[in-house]
Amino acid sequence: MEREVYRFRGKSLGLSLEGSVKPFARVREFTAVRLVEDGRVGCALAEGRNEEKAIKLARELLRFSKDESYSLPPGSRVRWERTFEADVEDSAEELSSLADDVGKRGLSLSGTVEFITRCLSVESTAGADVKGTYSLMKVELEIASNVPFSLSTGSAARTEVGKLLNPYLRLVEGLGETEPPKGEAEVIIAPTPLYALLISPILWKFRGSTAVKAPGMEAKEGEILASPLVTVLDDPIDKGSLRYVKADDEGVKAGKNVLIEEGVAKGLLWDSYTAWRAGRKSTGNGIRIGERVFDGPHNLTLAPGRKGLDGLIGEVEKGFLILGVRGANALDPTTGDFSVVATPALVIERGETVGFSRFELKGNVWELLKNTTGVGSELARIWLDEGLSLSLPFLRTEVVV
């Protein structure tokens, strides 16, 4: 019988700002076990460090699994640590002061700032011997003003919240509502709404499980999917990645995997099971949510370009800068078709923002990527509660409004 034991401990210290600053703390610890016997797989999870309970549950489930010829993947021996200490009291003073400063400018601020440390280990009879720890800072803010918007961002190190927020405040201050231009326009999409549009279609098209479950709908190597300005990769060993890992949750060594290079599809992401079903090898992309493992990115990255945000705006004759979207949950991941409300959208005329508006935007994610005219030079780091990290710049593309 083959055995894999995954241990996880996540600790979160944070601050909630809703009128006043309130601290909070969370700890989650569990042990997940995967057993394989004659190709049959049993997976189970027990809270805390109760490995015996997890093994017992996995053995019971093993009896009901189908008979296959799957085996655990060859594991690696890897160690890593990237952590920092967060002083919650100092952070509370900083956040309170920032809220006061924002209030003096006629704006209001709410949301959370969270410092997360995740510790994991993987041991298996197939040779996995993995231990890793990493910390991250997660920021979720709502800014209420004439131009209300949300900001999702983070950092791989302790960072002043004001440094993350101020570039956006500079954009929206003093703007009034105006009519949006019609017809063909260039749109700059900020990282927060960009991830809402990109994440589902990219996961659908570049996961090996799509090739297994819906053959023909996955990305094909050599297929042109985007502008030559667009390169998309998974890079967990990027020092700025919020999910900084050197091995995946199955103990397979993780590294950089290019999905789209200069607009051209290159390859898919595989965990060991979907790779086995397709006659392939794992790419080190086994991601665990609870006791289950699925194929997905650690740190999905749209590679930065060479232009700062001011440079992207300065080249737009007529267009928008979109800071938020609503309705992205209705996006069709299999086709990339979407219909969202862009709100707020800063109106750009002759290289300057002149007001804000909101409007319905219909289109297709892959067409947005094919029509890309510029990519920002700075990456915003975004953390999803499922344990995935994104690194995204501002992206400029052509649309019809």
Image (tube, grey):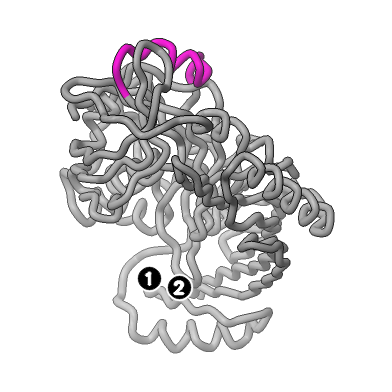
Whole-percent x, y for residue 6 in the image: 60, 68
Marks 2 & 1, CB-CB < 8 Å contact: yes
| Residue bounds of the magenta highlight | 305-319
10 Å neighbourhood of mark 1: few (<14), some, or many (≥20)? some
Identify whether 295 is placed above or below 147: below
Q: Residues within 10 Å of mark 2 (few under 14, many from 20)?
A: many
Residue 311 on the magenta span: yes
Q: Amino acid at mark 2?
A: Val
* Residue 189 drawn above or below residue 348: below
Residue 134: within the magenta? no
- The residue singled out by tag 2 in the image is 36
Location of residue 188 with respect to 324 vertically, above or below: above
Up the image or down, 36 lies above or below 317; here it is: below
Q: Nearer the viewer, residue 259 or 283?
A: 259
Image quadrant where residue 106 sits? top right
Q: Is residue 19 left or right of residue 298?
A: right
Residue denoted by label 1:
39
Amino acid identity at mark 1:
Gly
